[in-house]
Amino acid sequence: MSMDRRSFICLLSGAAWTGLLAAHAQQRTMPVIGFLNFASPDGYGPMMAAFLQGLRESGYVEGENVAIEYRWAKARGDRLPAMVADLVHRQVVVIAATSTPAALAAKAATANIPIVFETGFDPIMLGLVSNLSRPGGNITGVTSQSGGVLTPKRLEVLHQLLPKARVMALLVNPSNAIIAGTDTTGARLEAANFGVELLVLHASIEHEFDALFSNLIRLGAAGLVIGSDPLFTSRIEMLGALAAHHAVPAVLGTRGFVAAGGLVGYGGSFIDSYRLAGVYTGRILKGEKPGELPVQQGTKFEMFLNLKTAKALGIEVPASLLARADEVIE
């Protein structure tokens, strides 16, 4: 081999090695987001796409200039403390704590790493922040308003569909006392306005769902409002299918529930709130302080109706509800 050829090969090898070192250096310096969620990734595709879209709007693309460490508790709240402790140990730049239990776990774990939460409840009531306009400290986020104030609204929608009903049921998860208490208080006040008796039913694991639906007729409940607990929102297809199987008029706040056979979905837009959480995460990566970013309140609400389910249940959907629906599944 000639000297010139040998030199050329060495030059190419050196260039390749330099490029490899540069790539590794970029990986080491790429900021890392810790993404924490109570549920499992199944069914969260649209929300994750919205979160990543929000990041892109702030100038960050996963794998190009930011990395994400995902932690899914798969509806096991007891896993969250260890998961967030691991993210803290890894010294992620910011924690995106999507879902109420994840937000509470993140806040309890660190007062230093910035946190962006996504919740369907009042963050002041949850103790996440003390002020919406200037949250202070290391935390800010987005509320979709899908729980708390909207649980009574779901009962109102169910009452419009079943105006002669005198007994309704509310499903809550007693393991999450704050969420269960908020849902119960609001729903009871709304039921009293309608002169409806409200039965409060409990489920803390998914294996209790089937028996609960089976008992509704025996209990005399004409319909069911499913609370805003992440246990339920992470099992929307299962709950929708059970509602259809047991012929129970039921309301939850997501489209997936209705597509699986549930009667009505009504709530804040999770797509919108996850996108906003992504935007805030990107802004913090750029150097903004979370305590100076006001908590954003989602203003987009969605209603989905399953007319096939309504027909099977013998329910005539009022024209006023049809007009309000964002989507009608037939």
Image (cartoon, rainbow, N blue to C red):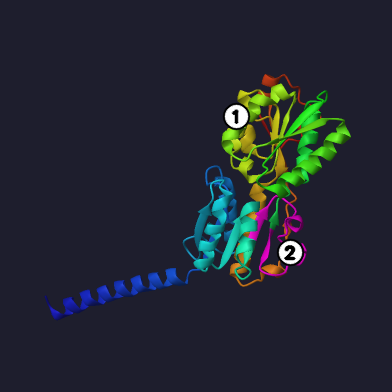
Q: Return the x and y of residue 216 as percentages of the image width and height.
A: 69, 26
Residue 22 sits in which quadrant? bottom left
The vertical placement of 11 against 100, above or below, is below
Q: Residues within 10 Å of mark 2 (few under 14, many from 20)?
A: some
Q: Mark 2 points at which residue?
A: 294
Q: Return the x and y of residue 204 as percentages of the image width and height.
A: 62, 40
Mark with earlier residue (2, 1): 1
Query: What residue is at 76 percent from the left and 55 percent from the top?
Result: 125
Between tags 2 and 1, which lies in front? 1
Quarter of the C terminus within the rendering: top right
The vertical placement of 56 against 258, above or below, is below
Q: Return the x and y of residue 324 as percentages of the image width and height.
A: 77, 36
Q: Estimate the spatial distance between the alpha carbons at disc 2 and disc 1, rounded to whole Å.
A: 42 Å
Q: Return the x and y of residue 57 as percentages of the image width and height.
A: 60, 60
Residue 170 sits in which quadrant? top right
What are the residue bounds of the magenta stretch? Answer: 116-141
Does any portion of residue 33 appear in the rendered image?
no
Name the mark on residue 210.
Answer: 1
Amino acid beneath label 2: Pro
Query: What residue is at 61 percent from the left and 37 percent from the top?
Result: 236
